[in-house]
């Protein structure tokens, strides 16, 4: 029971995919101009992560070792295609805002990384929880980045005005350089918090 | 001719794949510690992206469009890319061991480089012709290589600088990339 809980919590803080492992940077930087997009991307990645983790874990004794990466990629690509089609059908606006980054979930290093490092070695239930934990960790991380950038760049969070109509937007935050700088400073801040906690 | 030049300027400088479109950040942060490795990686990416885009364009027009199975795009493209990378590695090993030694270690990493899949998908999405796709892919990958080599140079300098302890490593690398991206925004007026 304790190991199950540990697998779940692991991805949220200790091995947070964005802040600790520094994986999946492309989508983290690209779609975090608005908090809403961050939630959408987080849910999409979590779905793919959980499904592929479970399926890969279930098939781990069948997949030959030599072609395992190709097998993983096909499994991940299948779920990404499902997400792509479902989002295009039901959440058209969000799908349009995220654009190219939905098919690119296939090459998101978090998913392949978890498949290789965890799901291919652990039982189904553990892999399921690992997927959920990593997914939550990823979603939280990009939501934080998304909120900060939206707050500074347009003075609102989830489209709701925070600073009032007289706020002059800090445009850099929503432009590409702002993404790099915001995430870099946030990583530094997380490092500092982590060091404080370790002491 | 003018169109070709504009397209190259646009993909290399104005809409740089790393600094403006956020594609290929993982290898960008991963292999930029030394200028030497950055040049090797950059060359491999130019090579693979151009080949892969040509292949995927043909697959899209000859197979996916003809049989009306465009929804298979993601799966088919990633398989084509993975196969291509393996194939290139084997051919290089047989024909030019020197080049293989120089590029060998970077090739497996390229399969999961989002620039490759990104360029392939974008070329189809923008409905480019075959020649346009080729130019687009060369421009995109040269842009990636340029950003990578520039950043590696910055990072070599950075290694000697005094940095606050908690910002060391990836954090300061990201902030530096931000400044580089800011500099590249200066090209914004070049192409409409």
Image (tube, rainbow, N blue to C red):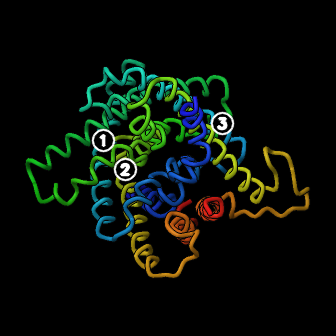
Q: Which residue is mark 2?
A: B137
Pointers 1 and 2 in contact (C-beta within 8 Å): yes
In the image, farthest residue toward the left: B95
Determine crowd level at label 1: few under 14, some 14-19, many 20+ residues with C-alpha closer than 10 A. Answer: some
Quarter occupied by residue A175: bottom right
Chain to which the residue tagged by mark 2 belongs: B
Which quarter shows the C terminus of chain B?
bottom right
Pointers 3 and 1 in contact (C-beta within 8 Å): no
Rendered view: A197 above or below B74: below
Tell me the SS state at disc 1.
helix
Q: Nearer the viewer, residue A124 or A160?
A: A124
Chain to which the residue tagged by mark 3 belongs: A
Can residue A175 be seen? Answer: yes
Rendered view: B91 above or below B180: above
Q: Report the side of B130 relative to A103 (left or right).
A: left
Q: Residue at x 61, y 47 (%)?
A: A13
Can residue B125 be seen? Answer: no
Determine crowd level at label 2: few under 14, some 14-19, many 20+ residues with C-alpha closer than 10 A. Answer: many
Q: Which residue is mark 1?
A: B54
Q: Which residue is mark 3?
A: A40
Q: Residue at x 87, y 62 (%)?
A: A167
Q: Nearer the viewer, residue B22 or A17?
A: A17
Q: Report the side of A165 relative to A110 (left or right).
A: right
Rendered view: A102 above or below A79: below
Horizontal and vertical percent position of residue B139: 39, 56
């Amino acid at each position: 029971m304790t190991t199950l809980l540990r697998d779940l919590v692991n991805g949220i803080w200790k091995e947070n995919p964005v802040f600790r492992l520094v994986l999946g940077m492309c989508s983290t930087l690209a779609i975090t101009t608005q908090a809403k997009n961050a939630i959408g991307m987080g849910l999409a990645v979590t779905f793919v992560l959980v499904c592929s983790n479970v399926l890969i874990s279930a098939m781990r004794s069948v997949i030959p070792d030599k072609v395992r990466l190709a097998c993983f990629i096909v499994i991940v690509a299948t779920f990404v295609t499902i997400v792509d089609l479902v989002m295009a059908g039901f959440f058209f606006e969000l799908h349009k805002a995220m654009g190219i980054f939905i098919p690119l979930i296939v090459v998101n290093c978090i998913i392949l990384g978890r498949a290789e490092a965890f799901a291919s070695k652990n039982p189904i239930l553990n892999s399921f929880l690992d997927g959920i934990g990593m997914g939550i960790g990823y979603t939280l991380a990009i939501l934080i980045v998304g909120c900060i950038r939206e707050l500074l760049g347009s003075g609102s969070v989830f489209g709701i005005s925070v600073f009032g109509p007289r706020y002059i937007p800090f445009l850099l935050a929503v432009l590409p350089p702002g993404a790099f700088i915001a995430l870099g400073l946030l990583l530094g801040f997380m490092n500092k918090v982590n060091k404080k906690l370790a002491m | 001719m003018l169109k070709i030049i504009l397209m190259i300027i646009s993909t290399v400088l104005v809409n740089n794949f790393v600094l403006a479109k956020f594609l290929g950040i993982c290898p960008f942060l991963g292999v930029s510690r030394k200028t030497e490795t950055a040049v090797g990686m950059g060359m491999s990416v130019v090579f693979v992206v151009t080949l892969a885009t040509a292949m995927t364009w043909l697959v899209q027009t000859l197979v996916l469009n003809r049989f009306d199975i465009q929804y298979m795009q993601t799966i088919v493209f990633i398989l084509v890319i993975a196969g291509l990378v393996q194939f290139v590695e084997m051919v290089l090993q047989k024909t030019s061991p020197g080049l293989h030694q120089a590029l060998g270690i970077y090739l497996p990493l390229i399969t999961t480089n989002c620039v490759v899949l990104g360029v392939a998908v974008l070329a189809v999405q923008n409905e480019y012709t075959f020649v346009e796709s080729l130019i687009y892919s060369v421009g995109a990958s040269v842009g990636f290589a340029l950003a990578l080599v520039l950043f590696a140079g910055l990072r070599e300098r950075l290694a000697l600088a005094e940095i606050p302890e908690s910002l060391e490593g990836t954090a300061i690398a990201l902030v530096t990339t931000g400044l580089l991206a800011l500099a590249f925004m200066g090209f914004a007026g070049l192409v409409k």
